[in-house]
Amino acid sequence: MRKLTFPIGGVHPEDMKYSRGHAIEVLPLPPVVYVSVAQHLGAPAVPCVAVGDKVKTGQVVAEPGGFISAYVHSPVSGTVKTIGPRADIAGRPVTHIEIVVEGDEWMEGIDLSEDLVTEIPTDREAVLEKIKACGVVGLGGATFPTHVKLNPPKDAKAECLIVDGAECEPYLTSDHRIMVEKPDQIVVGAAIMQMVLGGCRVVIAVEENKPDAIAALDAAIGRLGYKNIEVATLKMKYPQGSEKQLINAVLGRQVKSGALPISVGAVVQNTGTVLAVYDAVQKNRPLITNVLTVTGDCISGDRMHNYLFRIGMPLSYIADYAGGVPADAAKIVSGGTMMGKPIANLDAAAIKGTPAILYLSEEVTRRKPEGSCIRCGRCSDACPMGLEPFLLNRLYKADDLAALKENAVQDCIECGCCLYSCPSFIPLLDNIRMAKAKVKKL
Amino acid sequence: MDKFLVSPPPHAHSPRTTASLMRDVIIALLPATIVAVVFYGWSLVLVLAVSVASCVLLEWAICKWLMKRPFECPEAAVVTGLLLALSLPYTTPWWVVLIGAAFAIGVVKMTFGGLGQNVFNPASAARVFLLVSFPSYLTHWEMPQRLFGADAVTGPTVLSLANEGGTQALANLSQMGWHPLFAYVGGSAGEISVLALLVGFAYLLLRRVVKIWIPLSIFVTVAAVSAVFHAIDPVTYTGPIFNLLSGGLVLGACFMATDYVTSPMTSKGGVIFGFGIGLLVMMIRYFGAYPEGVSFAILLMNMAVPLIDRWCHQPKFGREE
């Protein structure tokens, strides 16, 4: 079978997916959870409960604060203790709703059974409303509200829904595990999205290092018998899970600079999101759980885990449950090595899109001192957007904003391939990010 | 939490570093170096030792006392030293080698700002500097004693024969022990075995240290130009096989023209760069006063690199028509 990939740039870091064989484990509830109102891209949600209120699992605790925003639900049952600022993983104050856990009593009408519901609803608006009401956001990294993304402008026609199962980031295995363990649910979720998008083709794109996931999805598609849904095998290359690169790999089309994927007829949804849509539409279950990977180069395989967590659990609680922070961890990252967010505050609460707790040793993660550019061109070769990072770096240092714009600095997707590849450890991406911010202000 | 690092992604790095890339170039030069040492013996070891040691020591000294900054990548200086030694005859006196190394590092590399900043390839520039300063040491070669018994024989290079007397002069070359792929007698030390150079270059390609475009473009251009001229007048003009395999072409094309610092950033630029070098090499060989033109051609095209880079950009995602 032909394996697909994107044509420009990319790098091949070792995949490091040692936790791929670990089945998803359900984390027990902590005594207290802290539910952030900013778990999505866009306006923060507005709390709609008061201190002292009793809440049930799955009850709305914050409502959308704008068009691009999302509902937030209580992940536990208990009593609202405080509502106020608390540090997120970067240490920035964000409003959190503190809930003291008292049992786990779910809202009425939520189907907690494992029975597969295969019948696809036909009322598009009702499905979108349900997705919105359940607070579903993109779990591939951007946490963009899913009901907005599934509702493209009237004049645009979706030709293909691409389900992103690439999971190209090193170390991460949560998507891999859900594809292996819940392939039926993912296929049903994809079929629901297919209906919402007007019956387009669906391609579930998975990298070749997950043959068991590919087989499981193939079998599920055969079992369920939906039309026009297929699995595509991708070559291993980072950043294949990036929206534009994935569309290029699967459809051979390039989204023009500044345009949305729908301009080439594509909609991309992460596997985790598809599962969340299944849960929302078929089970009436709001997005209060997700799977994260506890992994890293400084813990052994038996200490790695794939956990089903509830939002609001402090990361330190999850880390402690998994055996504590390893002694030689120099950096803790929420995500993979290429684009994960550094964790400045391990007491921060998990949010809908928390992908991993990754422990990295000093040796792997400490940046080496910056050397001289030897013009090897590896940054340009690696850039999946076809940019010239060495040039952008030079233009940033010269503060030449017009030339930066001309050389498409705003096209940078911040995948990190340039800095990863630079043999002289020049902080290309750091400087390009700052250049982007300056150009944006023009 | 204060003991943990907090820095933006990416959080890991490719194992490739400038030093490791340069180490790969050194490894790639080893086959040719070893073959040359076997052929030429201790005299070449002296040339190699003087060249490499003076390049490294001089760069270290300039970094320490003049530029007052760390000596960043000694491996790069080793590469310059090796390339310079391999582009000289094994009979070059040690003090001439020393002057060449001092010019390569002191003038060509460090005055422009050191690693990554030089316009010209240091080894090529030093070779040309020595060629015009000490022509007698660089254009006439002694046949190595190992091959020809007791008496050392002094003779011209095959290219200077061709330059002076056309293809007729080459007729008796095979009797002199000339074989294109291996025992190429009379030339720079590194030119002794085209095969060894190509093996080294294949290693660089396999390790993805360099791309094939620059050397390929040089070889194709040299072959095409000499094929045309040879077809027109086979007596005056030497043919493609001879031109591809003789002189410093393989050494220059595979190891000097591919120098990161002094070659274009894009593959497209590399093709233009290689075309320019190939064309200039043939013009110098056919019509120039010097028998050999690879170093000159590389230096001339080095000057064009900023222009080529300005013109050649790689295709940008979603911006091509």
Image: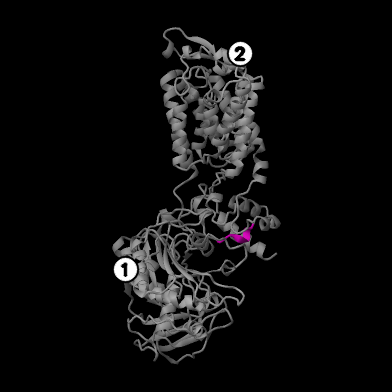
Do discs 1 and 2 belong to a common subunit? no
Q: Quadrant of the N terminus of chain A?
A: bottom left
Q: Indicate the chain on which mark 2 is placed.
A: B
Say whether marks 1 and 2 touch (CB < 8 Å). no
Q: Amino acid at mark 2?
A: Gly
Q: Is residue B94 above or below residue A174?
A: above
At mark 2, the secondary structure is helix
**Between B303 and B234, the one nearer to me in the picture:** B234
Q: Is residue B170 above or below residue B57?
A: above
| Horizontal and vertical percent position of residue A31 | 36, 82
Mark carried by residue A323: 1
Looking at the image, can residue B259 be seen? yes
| Horizontal and vertical percent position of residue A308 | 36, 74
**Between B46 and A227, the one nearer to me in the picture:** A227
| Horizontal and vertical percent position of residue A348 | 45, 74
Please check the rendered image and state whether residue A166 is part of the magenta-colored stretch, yes or no: no
Which residue, as the protein is rendered here, is positioned at the far left? A302
Residue named by callout 2: B165
Crowdedness near tag 2: few (<14), some (14–19) or many (≥20) residues, C-alpha within 10 Å: some
Q: Which residues are magenta?
A: A408-413
Q: Quadrant of the C terminus of chain A?
A: bottom right
Q: Amino acid at mark 1?
A: Gly
**Between B299 and A277, the one nearer to me in the picture:** A277
At mark 1, the secondary structure is loop
